[in-house]
Amino acid sequence: MASIFTRIINREIPAHIVAEDDSFISFLDINPLVMGHALVIPKKEVDYIYDLDDDTLAALHLFSKRVAKAIESSVSCQRIGIAVIGLEVPHTHVHLVPLNSMDDINFSRPKLNPSEEELAKMAEKIRTNLV
């Protein structure tokens, strides 16, 4: 059965996509820790990040860097934090989280619940800042 992320890639489930190429896609987390929190995933469904082949793993990080720079230009923050947890969805994914404090990347705290309009505006702002 396809993961929820594969269903997003296949456009079976809507998402606020901020970047995409032939191998990777990035979209906003619908329940972010902070506004601008995005996920980056390979289009090939692989559960565990360290099961990716070396070229895909390296390319994932380069794609993530491009997205992180766009988020950093779009959201007031000191830097972009990166987290790979990988327990909640069996599809490799990287969290990119704008940081102003260590607590901004605390996954045990309550998540935000932004409106579709807020997410759409944030996604557009990030897309505008992609280089």
Image (spheres, grey):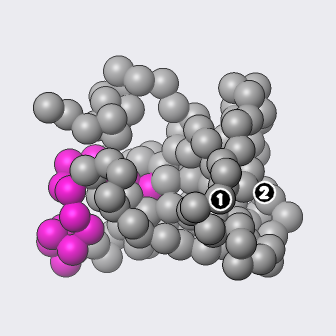
Image depth: mark 1 or mark 2 in front? 1
What is the count of numbered marks? 2
The amino acid beneath tag 1 is Arg
Q: Quadrant of the N terminus?
A: top left
Q: Which quadrant of the structure image shows residue 103?
A: bottom right
Neighbor class of circle 2 (other Cα within 10 Å; few <14, some 14-19, many 20+) is many
Q: Quadrant of the C terminus?
A: bottom right
Q: Is residue 119 magenta?
A: no
Residue pushed farthest right?
A: 76
Q: Which quadrant of the structure image shows residue 4?
A: top left
Q: Which residue: 80% across, 74% down?
A: 100
Residue 107 in the image: state x and y as whole percent: 57, 62
Specify the segment rendered in magenta.
40-55
Sequence-wise, the earlier of marks 1 and 2 is 2
Q: Which residue: 57% across, 53% down?
A: 38
Q: Is residue 46 left or right of residue 30?
A: left
Q: Is residue 7 left or right of residue 117?
A: left
Q: Is residue 99 left or right of residue 58?
A: right
The amino acid beneath tag 2 is Ser
Front-lying residue, 103 or 126: 103
User: For residue 109, which numbered disc appears in the image?
Assistant: 1
Q: In the image, is residue 21 above or below residue 48?
A: above
Q: Is residue 65 left or right of residue 73?
A: left
User: For residue 95, which numbered disc appears in the image?
Assistant: none
Residue 44 visible, this angle: no
Q: Which residue is mark 2?
A: 74
Q: In the image, is residue 39 above or below residue 113?
A: below
